[in-house]
C-alpha cells in the first residue's frame, strides 16, 4: 500500500515527459523567455531559503542534541529582538524582489501592441473544441493553424464563443483565458525563429478539452504574405458538379473555403496542408501521436466525417452521415477534395 502514492507520484511526473514540443522550459520567444526567467528567479529564491532553513535545522539538531550524561531541561531562551528583525526583514525582502519582478513582467506581457505598426493583429476566438484566428488587417480568417511571421510581435485579442477556454503556447507564452463575460483579454506573442509551436487549451472545458489543440506556425515574412494571398484567393470547389453541390449545400452553410461559405465552423481553406484534422491525428490504433504511422489526411477526414463524435466527443458538428444524410461515396469524394486542397506558402 505504501507504494501506491509513490506510483502515483512517478506516473504524474512521467506524464509530463511525452511532449517536448509542449515545454515551457524551452522558450522560443521573448514572452516565454521572460516567463521562464520568473520561474527561475522564484525557484532559486525558494531553493536558497530551503538550504538555509534546512541547514540551520540540521546544525541545531546535531550541535545541540542530548549528549551522554546530560539530564534535565537545557537553558531556555525567550525572545530575541535582533533575530526577530532578521527573520522578518529577509522574507519581506525576498517577497519584494519576487513581487516587483512579477508585476513588471505581468505588465510587459499584457502590453497592448495592437496600435504598433510593425505588429500583426490576430483576433483569437475559442470554440468547443477548436480555435479561430482572424487577421483584421488582412480580412483573413483561419482555424487551428495560426500562421505568423517570425520575429514580429503578434498582438492578440482573445475571446470565447461559448465557454471558458485558455490560450496556451508553452514555447511562446503562458496561458491567457478567453472569458465568458464578454471581456477581451489582450496578450502578445513573438516567435524568435521559424517553426511550429504547439498550443493547447489550458482550461477544462468539456469532454474533448484534451483534444483542443492548435499550432502556431512561424514562417518568413515572404511566406506569410504568400499565405495571406492564398487565403484571399477565390475558393477552389470540388471539380465534380454533384460533389460541389453537396459540399456547397451541406458543408459551406457552416464552414468556409476561400471567399465562400459561413463563419460558424472552422475555415477549411487549404486543409490538405495541415498535419492534423480537428487537432487530432489518427493512426491505425486510433488517436495517435505525430509520426510516420499516421494515416493520410484523407483517411483522417473520412473517419472524422463518418462519425465526428467518435473522434472528438462533444463537438458541435452535425454528423454528415446521420444528420445530413451524406452517403459513404459522397464522404469519400469530399474527403479527397479537401485532402487535395493544399496551399503552397
Ligand atoms: Cu477548451 Cu479546454
Image: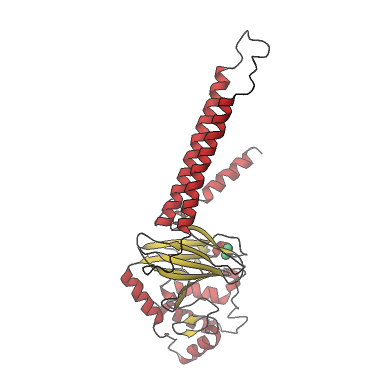
| Rendering coords of residue 201 (x, y %) | 54, 62
Q: How many marks?
A: 0
| Rendering coords of residue 47 (x, y %) | 49, 37
| Rendering coords of residue 78 (x, y %) | 64, 21
The residue closer to the viewer here, 122 or 262, is 122
Residue 147 position by quadrant: bottom left
Q: Is residue 68 left or right of residue 244?
A: right
The residue closer to the viewer here, 142 or 238, is 142
Q: Is residue 303 above or below residue 207?
A: below
Q: Is residue 333 left or right of residue 66?
A: left
- Identify the residue at the far left of this view: 222
Which residue is located at x 52 percent, y 27 percent? 55
Colouring scheme applied when the structure was drawn: secondary structure
Q: Is residue 84 above or below residue 136?
A: above
- Identify the residue at the far top of this view: 69
Q: Quadrant of the N terminus?
A: top right
- Identify the residue at the far right of this view: 72
Q: Quadrant of the C terminus?
A: bottom left
Q: Is residue 90 visible?
A: yes
The residue closer to the viewer here, 2 or 168, is 168
Q: Is residue 285 visible?
A: no
The residue closer to the viewer here, 164 or 120, is 120
| Rendering coords of residue 137 (x, y %) | 42, 76
Residue 293 position by quadrant: bottom left
Which residue is located at x 58 percent, y 21 percent? 61
Taking the image as four quarters, which one is ligand 1 found in? bottom right
Amino acid at each position: 500500500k505504501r507504494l501506491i502514492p509513490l506510483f502515483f507520484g512517478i506516473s504524474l511526473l512521467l506524464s509530463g515527459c511525452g511532449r517536448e514540443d509542449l515545454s515551457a522550459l524551452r522558450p522560443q520567444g521573448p514572452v516565454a523567455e521572460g516567463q521562464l526567467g520568473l520561474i527561475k528567479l522564484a525557484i532559486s529564491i525558494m531553493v536558497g531559503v530551503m538550504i538555509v532553513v534546512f541547514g540551520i535545522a540540521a546544525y541545531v539538531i546535531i550541535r545541540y542534541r542530548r549528549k551522554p550524561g546530560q539530564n534535565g531541561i537545557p537553558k531556555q531562551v525567550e525572545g530575541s529582538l535582533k533575530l526577530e528583525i532578521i527573520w522578518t526583514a529577509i522574507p519581506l525582502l525576498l517577497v519584494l524582489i519576487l513581487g516587483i519582478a512579477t508585476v513588471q513582467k505581468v505588465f510587459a506581457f499584457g502590453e497592448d501592441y495592437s496600435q504598433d505598426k510593425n505588429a500583426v493583429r490576430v483576433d483569437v476566438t475559442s470554440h468547443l473544441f477548436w480555435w479561430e484566428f482572424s487577421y483584421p488587417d488582412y480580412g483573413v480568417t483561419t482555424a487551428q493553424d495560426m500562421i505568423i511571421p517570425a520575429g514580429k510581435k503578434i498582438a492578440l485579442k482573445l475571446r470565447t464563443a461559448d465557454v471558458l477556454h485558455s490560450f496556451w503556447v508553452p514555447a511562446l507564452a503562458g496561458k491567457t483565458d478567453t472569458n465568458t463575460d464578454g471581456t477581451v483579454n489582450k496578450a502578445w506573442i513573438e516567435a524568435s525563429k521559424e517553426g511550429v509551436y504547439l498550443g493547447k487549451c489550458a482550461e477544462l472545458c468539456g469532454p474533448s478539452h484534451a483534444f483542443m489543440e492548435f499550432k502556431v506556425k512561424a514562417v518568413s515574412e515572404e511566406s506569410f504574405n504568400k499565405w495571406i494571398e492564398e487565403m484571399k484567393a477565390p475558393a477552389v470547389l470540388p471539380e465534380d458538379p454533384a460533389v460541389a453541390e453537396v459540399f456547397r449545400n451541406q458543408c459551406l452553410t457552416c464552414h468556409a473555403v476561400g471567399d465562400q461559405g459561413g463563419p460558424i465552423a472552422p475555415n477549411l481553406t487549404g486543409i490538405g496542408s495541415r498535419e492534423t484534422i480537428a487537432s487530432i491525428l489518427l493512426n491505425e490504433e486510433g488517436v495517435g501521436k505525430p509520426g510516420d504511422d499516421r494515416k493520410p489526411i484523407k483517411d483522417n477526414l473520412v473517419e472524422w466525417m463518418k462519425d465526428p463524435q467518435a473522434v472528438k466527443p462533444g463537438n458541435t458538428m452535425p454528423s454528415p452521415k446521420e444528420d445530413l444524410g451524406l452517403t459513404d461515396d459522397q464522404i469519400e469524394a469530399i474527403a479527397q477534395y479537401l485532402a487535395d486542397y493544399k496551399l503552397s506558402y
